[in-house]
Amino acid sequence: MHYKEPGNSDDSSSSSSADSSSKNTWSVLANTERWISDTLDSSNKAETDRQDAAEKLKRQKEQDTKLPHFADAKNPESPSPPRVDNPYARKEVTYVCETGEDCVGVVGGMFRQVREARELGESHGRGVEARLGDTNSQPATMRQTNVVVMPNCDELSTSFHTFDKLVQSINQARRASRDFVLKKKENDDGSKDWVVSINCAHLHPQYGKQTPAEQLAQLKAEEEAGEVDVHLEEYKKSRMAARQSPYPSVIVEVMSTPPPDFGVNLDTEAGAAHQAALDAAEKNMHIMENKKKVDADDDVTSADVRRLEALFGMSAAKKEGSVDDTFYDALGEAFGNEQIVPETPLSKAQHWVLANDPQFDAGTSVFTNSNTRHVDAAYEYIFNNIAMMLHSSDTDDSESVFKHGQDQKSYVVLPNFVPTSATSFDRFAGQVSNIIRAMPSMAEKVMVSTFHPEHVDTRTRAPLPILVITWK
């Protein structure tokens, strides 16, 4: 693969604007990688110079020391610490370019990177657990750094404060999700879940740029202090310069560690008692399961058996003039022509909204659904949904179902996301609103509300969790 270096060109065929040249994906990634390499290299060079100066001073002191003739040092010098010249020696670094131009799409892309990082950590844990049977296999911690570059969003590129506020709101939403009551997989006791931690930090060309109010506050603080530490100020400047990247970027670091070992020594009295309690609990669980099976069999009465005998005794071959299968016709006659129609979560939510939401408008409302049960995937789906609606509204396609106007509603059905906690779902909607308010272009355009099966208000008690996006 080749990338084009940004810059002016005399060739008429490549006389595009400098802006489009600088936003070429390969050039953006190459510039960012080069900047990170140079920054880390300069930091490593400073550490190497410090080590060299310390070694030189040590040798000078040894030479100045007067030793007797019989104490001549014949042993080789102690090995010096290894020089760190490779900036990528510590961990793996990957680069991704988010090419979205609108802020909402960039946020959806950021949550996609967080989701993929979490899935990577979980996949690493499952792979290690699958190899634990090998004698040479040991649980190993996985670390990876992903640099997500966002060069095309002018709203974030021109204002560091907007970008900083947006990233802070995203991190706040991720911290708030720790208290959500999430739905777990079936037969998942959590005993072998690896600990996957994700950290998001941001870089920006104007990183650290202060507002006039912040500058005034800093001047007052320096005046009150009365003395300025020159070395501290130089350190702050170098630290600030280390985060002034060529483009707005987010550093996503993922670490997957083995689950904590809470094993009990079975040789001790406490360990034996603990194991006995576990065995008793497992035996009790099996007894309850067998009891449930017996209770289910007891629900079958003799009348049900006679109806089944009559059903199978019918002559299905004599049925004529039916568009359905003859067996199902006989089944309908045996059970009083009662039919069971399957209903999807989306259709179930649609029927409830049609019957209970007085603000529903069939001409301006749309329904979408997602089966995710993870917080990062839910955020990704919500913001990608908003970005799709926003992009479709800017096109000239008259047949677009996402043409939105005043008070248009988008009903996002999430049947598996916090289905047993209305409080968690309301907090999730509140964090979505906080992230939207951090975008100046979207702060006054969108309003978020919720329906949930466990809402206190009966008017908003829907059969499924539904997040409503209303365009103002």
Image (cartoon, rainbow, N blue to C red):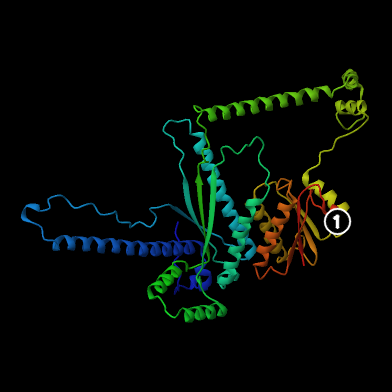
Left or right of residue 309, residue 44 in this image:
left
Mark 1 lies on a secondary structure that is loop
Q: Where 135 sits versus 472, above or below?
A: above
The amino acid pointed to by label 1 is Asp
Task: Single out the residue that lies furthest toward the left.
Answer: 69
Quarter of the image with the C terminus is: bottom right
Image quarter of residue 277: top right
The mark total stands at 1
Is 218 or 102 nearer to us in this picture?
218
Q: Where is residue 354 in the image (x, y as percent from the top left)?
A: 86, 53
Is 358 or 390 nearer to us in this picture?
358
According to the picture, the residue beneath numbered tag 1 turns out to be: 357
Task: Single out the residue that lies furthest toward the front.
Answer: 269
Which class describes the residues within 10 Å of circle 1: few (<14), some (14-19), or many (20+)? Answer: few
Image quarter of residue 381: bottom right
Q: Where 266 sits versus 138, above or below?
A: above
Q: Where 175 sits versus 286, above or below?
A: below
Q: Position of residue 338 (x, y in %)?
A: 90, 33
Residue at left 57%, top 50%? 116
Residue at left 69%, top 68%? 443
Left or right of residue 97, residue 351 in this image:
right
Viewer can see residue 111: yes
